[in-house]
């Protein structure tokens, strides 16, 4: 009975190969109808040919209806056949029609993201244009940013420095750019109050940009003579060595205020707790979700997520920048509205009587 | 022109950074890889030279003016030059022209890294547990409604994931998981939406030259 079964092993049918959509080329998708003996076979072998005659085995897959061939050359024709395999017995399918892989210029899977970006970007640009026309925009109070003046003033009164840590992010990270924007505004204040600003760095590119920003800020408020390039320096690009260096600065220099603003990882709590132990006022800000609880716990003020991006606009009160914040808020309102609508629709499907959306 | 040129560069390279996200074509992807890997590495190498120059200047200055703890600057400078010489002339695994072993004593860069840098980093990381304990002590005090809620939920989650939680009530581990999966995720998602929109707005402001603080501000 078993022998009869083996000798009558049925092949898979309707083998079809086609170019993988929305990719950079070099990939073909192969599909087939399962063998009628699918329940008893080991799996399927995939054979490929460039001329429709000389086939070579390119892979084996378990019980499946499809597979991919990611070793193709774009523009070349390929033929496929599939063999149902049971032990050493094979049942070959018909040969597929020729297929050619090609790269695409647009990834259609991302069109929804592009549309969302255009809509939200449009809203932001609209409010920026409103601000350009001189329209008054109300921005809610952010206590962490209101405390900047107080923190700088306190350091001046105590005759102690201010430590500004931009985190361990790289220049291409938005949080690092936002941190540098805030650094520029803080530097203007330290220049006006003639307070020492210590700014140690983890990344050499961020360091070079920061040095220019601080120098420019001092020049802008008419205090280029007060700028000391020795206070803005590169330390190391080793995460925990950087944390150790900053802890050392906190304990030796005893800054009156610590700014911990940027991208942080595991070192966030090491820095924030050491700063707290020295009695410094601490203003932190990050978009690293996992580090936010640590910073909220150990710092006096924390800029959560997008508050960090809004900071430079808030401090400088630049109308155009304020317009962008207003646009962000409207974006959040739209997203919240969509979420509420989707939740209501989701809830309605739970009631059989109201199965409107099934 | 001094300000316009960097703004034009930022706009061009910003757009070049967005296009590969939408266009999977190899010509675009390869250009993007070249910009991110090759060009950025060359820039980073130049910046590293500036960075190291700054580091050495600071420590030479400390030694020169006998600032607080200036002796440690000697440690930094000596180890800096020693490891630089060993790395440059001895190779990473001691395959260079400079001999990096005396008998069974190896001092190539790989050995130094594995036996000095890694343990020191691990020591700093281990300190985190003590800092967590001290932070938890300060934050888990019921001084306000929010702090009380934090204290309660933290207590439930901590007990819930322990075997003891299951012994108190079989429903406790599920409740602890619910706290983690529902209110906690809801909060995180709210922040994540804000971050996404903030990133978009910041990127737009920089691309369009509205945000110029990175240029040091000014017109």
Image (cartoon, helix red, strand yellow):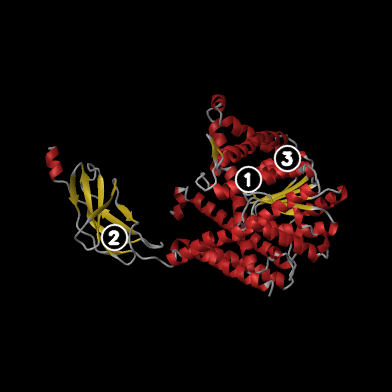
> Closer to the observer: label 1 or label 2?
1
Q: Which mark is residue A274?
A: 3
Check the image and report above or below for B132 versus A317: above
Q: Residue at coordinates 51% horizontally, 66% vertically from top-left?
A: B19
Q: Nearer the viewer, residue B4 or A226?
A: A226
Mark 2 or 3, nearer chain start: 2
Q: Which residue is mark 1?
A: B82
Residue reaching furthest to the right = A157
Residue reaching furthest to the bottom = B1
Q: Which residue is mark 2?
A: A17
In screen coordinates, is B96 left or right of B119? left
> Closer to the observer: label 2 or label 3?
3
Quarter holding residue A326: bottom right
Chain of the residue on which disc 1 is drawn? B
Q: Secondary structure at mark 1?
A: helix
Q: Position of residue B44 (x, y in %)?
A: 60, 58
Quarter holding residue A70: bottom left
Compute the Cα span from label 1 to label 2.
Answer: 60 Å
Q: Position of residue A281 (x, y in %)?
A: 78, 46
Compute the Cα span from label 3 to label 1.
Answer: 31 Å
- Is there one chain holding both mark 1 and mark 2? no
Cβ atoms under marks 3 and 1 closer than 8 Å: no
């Amino acid at each position: 009975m078993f022998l009869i079964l083996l000798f009558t092993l049925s092949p898979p049918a309707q083998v079809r190969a086609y170019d993988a959509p929305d990719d950079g080329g070099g990939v073909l998708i192969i599909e087939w109808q399962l063998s009628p003996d699918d329940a008893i076979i080991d799996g399927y072998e995939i054979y490929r040919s460039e001329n429709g005659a000389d086939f070579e085995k390119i892979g084996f897959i378990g019980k499946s209806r499809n597979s991919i061939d990611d070793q193709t050359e774009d523009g070349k024709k390929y033929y496929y056949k599939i063999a149902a395999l049971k032990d050493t017995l094979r049942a070959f399918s018909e040969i597929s029609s020729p297929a050619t892989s090609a790269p695409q210029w647009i990834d259609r899977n991302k069109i929804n993201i592009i549309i969302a970006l255009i809509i939200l970007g449009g809203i932001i640009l609209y409010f920026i244009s409103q601000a350009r026309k001189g329209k008054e925009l109300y921005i809610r109070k952010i206590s962490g940013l209101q405390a900047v003046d107080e923190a700088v003033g306190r350091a001046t009164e105590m005759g102690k420095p201010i430590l500004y840590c931009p985190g361990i992010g790289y220049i291409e990270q938005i949080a690092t750019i936002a941190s540098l924007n805030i650094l520029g505004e803080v530097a203007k204040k330290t220049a006006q109050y003639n307070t020492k600003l210590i700014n140690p760095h983890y990344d050499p590119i961020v360091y070079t940009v920061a040095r220019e920003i601080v120098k420019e800020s001092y020049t802008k408020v008419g205090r280029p003579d007060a700028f000391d390039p020795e206070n803005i320096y590169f330390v190391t690009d080793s995460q925990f060595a950087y944390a150790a260096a900053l802890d050392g600065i906190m304990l030796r220099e005893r800054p009156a205020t610590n700014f911990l603003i940027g991208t942080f990882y595991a070192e966030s709590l090491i820095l924030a707790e050491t700063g707290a132990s020295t009695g410094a006022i601490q203003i932190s800000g990050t978009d690293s979700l996992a580090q936010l609880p640590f910073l909220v716990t150990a710092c006096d003020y924390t800029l959560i997520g997008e508050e960090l991006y809004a900071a430079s606009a808030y401090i400088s009160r630049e109308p155009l920048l304020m317009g962008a914040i207003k646009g962000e808020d409207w974006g959040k309102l739209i997203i919240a509205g969509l979420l509420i609508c989707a939740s209501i629709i989701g809830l309605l499907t739970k009631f059989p009587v109201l199965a409107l959306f099934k | 022109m001094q300000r316009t040129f960097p703004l034009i560069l930022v706009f061009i390279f910003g757009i070049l950074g967005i296009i590969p996200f939408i266009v999977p074509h190899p010509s675009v992807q390869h250009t993007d890889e070249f910009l991110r890997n090759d060009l950025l590495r060359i820039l980073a190498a130049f910046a590293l030279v500036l960075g190291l120059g700054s580091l050495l200047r600071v420590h030479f200055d400390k030694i020169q003016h006998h600032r607080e703890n200036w002796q440690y600057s000697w440690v930094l400078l000596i180890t800096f030059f020693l490891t630089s010489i060993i790395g440059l002339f001895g190779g990473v695994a001691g395959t260079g022209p400079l001999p990096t072993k005396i008998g069974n004593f190896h001092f190539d860069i790989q050995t130094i890294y594995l036996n000095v840098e890694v343990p020191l980093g691990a020591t700093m990381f281990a300190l985190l547990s003590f800092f967590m304990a001290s932070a938890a002590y300060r934050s888990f005090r019921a001084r306000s409604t929010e702090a009380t809620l934090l204290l309660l939920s933290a207590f439930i989650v901590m007990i819930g994931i322990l075997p003891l939680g299951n012994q108190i009530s079989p429903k406790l581990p599920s409740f602890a998981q619910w706290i983690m999966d529902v209110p906690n995720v809801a909060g995180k998602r709210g922040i994540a939406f804000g971050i996404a929109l903030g990133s978009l707005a910041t990127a737009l402001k920089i691309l369009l030259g509205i945000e110029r603080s990175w240029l040091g501000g000014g017109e």
